Image (cartoon, rainbow, N blue to C red):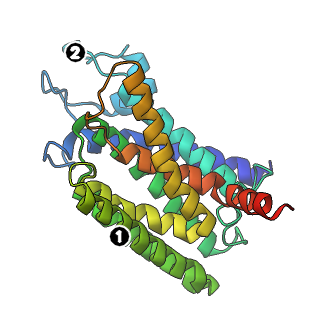
Amino acid sequence: MAPFAIFIVAFAGLLGLVIGSFLNVVAYRVPAGMSIVPASRCPKCGASIRAWQNVPVLSWLALRGKCAECGEAISPRYPAVELVTGFAFALIAWVALGASGYDLSTRFARSTTDITGAAFWLVLVAFLYFAAISIVLTVIDLDTHRLPNQIVLPSYLVAGILFAAAATLTNDWAALIRAAIGMAVLYAFYFLLRLIRPGGMGGGDVKLAGVVGIYLGWLGWGALIVGAFAAFVLGGLFGIALILFRRAGRKTAIPFGPWMLAGAWVGIFFGQPLANWYVAMLSGT
C-alpha cells in the first residue's frame, strides 16, 4: 500500500473508534427517549465521565470494565462496538482506495475513479455513514426490536445529498437514478410483505428497506438483487439455527433489521461479482 493509502486507512480506523464511542451513546439514549447532547454519566452513581475515561477501548481496559467512582460494571459491548466500528471504517477505506487489489464491487472500489476528486470522498463518506447506522441500528434492534425513526429517516436525506452531489460532479446520473429505483423497489417490496403478513415485518423494516435500496442501487443492479436476497437467506439460516438449538419456536419474533443490513453489506462487497458469475454460469461462458 502507498503511504497515502496507509494514512487514510489508519485515519478511518481511528475515526471509527471515536464514532463507535458515540454510537454507544446513541444506542443507549435514543430508544430511551433521552437527549444525546448531555455528557455521559454512570447510570448507577451519576458520576460524570471524565475526558480520559472516554478514550475508546483504552479507557475501558484501564478501568478494568468498571466505573471509576462506584465500581459498577461497564458492559464489554461498549469497547466491542468501538472496535467493530473502527475495523469497519478501515475496511471500507481500504476497499474504496483499491488497496485490496481486488474490486469487491466495481462501483464501490474506485466508484468515482479519481481519488483526488471530491466525488470520491463524498461516496466514501456516504458508505462510512451507512456503516455507522448499520452498527447502531443492529444494536438497537437486537435490544428493543425497534428501528428508530430518528436514525432511519434522516438517512434518506444524508444518502440523497451525498450521492446527488457526487453524481453532479461526475455527471453519473445513471447511478443516481438506480439509487432512486432501488429505494422505491425495496421500500415497495417490504411494504407489500407487511400488508400480506402484518406481524412478520415491522414498519421500521419497511423504512430501512428504502435506505438499503439507495446504497445497493447506487452500486449496480447486481448489488441490489444480491443484497436484497442475502437478507432473507441470512435471516432464514439464523432462524433455523435458533429452532434447531431450541432457542426459539416457529412463531418467535426475530429482529430482521440486522439481517437486512448484513445482506446489504454482502451486496455491497460481493453483489456485482456474484451477479456476474451467475450470469456467466447461465450463459455457459
Q: Earlier in the sequence, mark 1 or mark 2?
A: 2
Residue 169 in the figure: left or right of residue 238: right
Rendered location of residue 36, percent (x, y): 22, 48
Count of numbered marks: 2
Please name whichever residue, 97 or 259, is drawn nearer the observer in this view of the structure: 259
Res. 72 in view: yes
Which residue shows up at 39% across the image and 43% down it? 258
Place residue 79 in its image quadrant. top left
Please name whichever residue, 243 or 170, is drawn nearer the observer in this view of the structure: 243
Cα–Cα gap, marks 1 and 2: 46 Å
Quarter of the image with the C terminus is bottom right
Please determine whether, in this image, residue 43 is positioned above or below residue 202.
Answer: above
Q: Which mark is residue 72?
A: 2
The amino acid at mark 1 is: Ala
Between marks 1 and 2 in the image, the one whose residue lies nearer the viewer = 1
Which residue shows up at 43% across the image and 44% down it? 259
Q: Secondary structure at mark 2?
A: loop
Rendered location of residue 161, percent (x, y): 43, 76
Q: Secondary structure at mark 1?
A: helix
Place residue 60 in its image quadrant. top left
The amino acid at mark 2 is: Glu
Check disc 1: other Cα within 10 Å, few if <14, some if 14-19, many if 20+: some
Rendered location of residue 103, percent (x, y): 75, 57
Which residue shows up at 35% across the image and 17% down it? 65
Please determine whether, in this image, residue 98 is positioned above or below residue 239.
Answer: below
Q: Which residue is mark 1?
A: 188
Residue occupying the far right of the picture: 285
Res. 39 in view: no
Residue 138 in the figure: left or right of residue 5: left
Which residue shows up at 55% across the image and 86% down it? 168
Place residue 88 in its image quadrant. top right
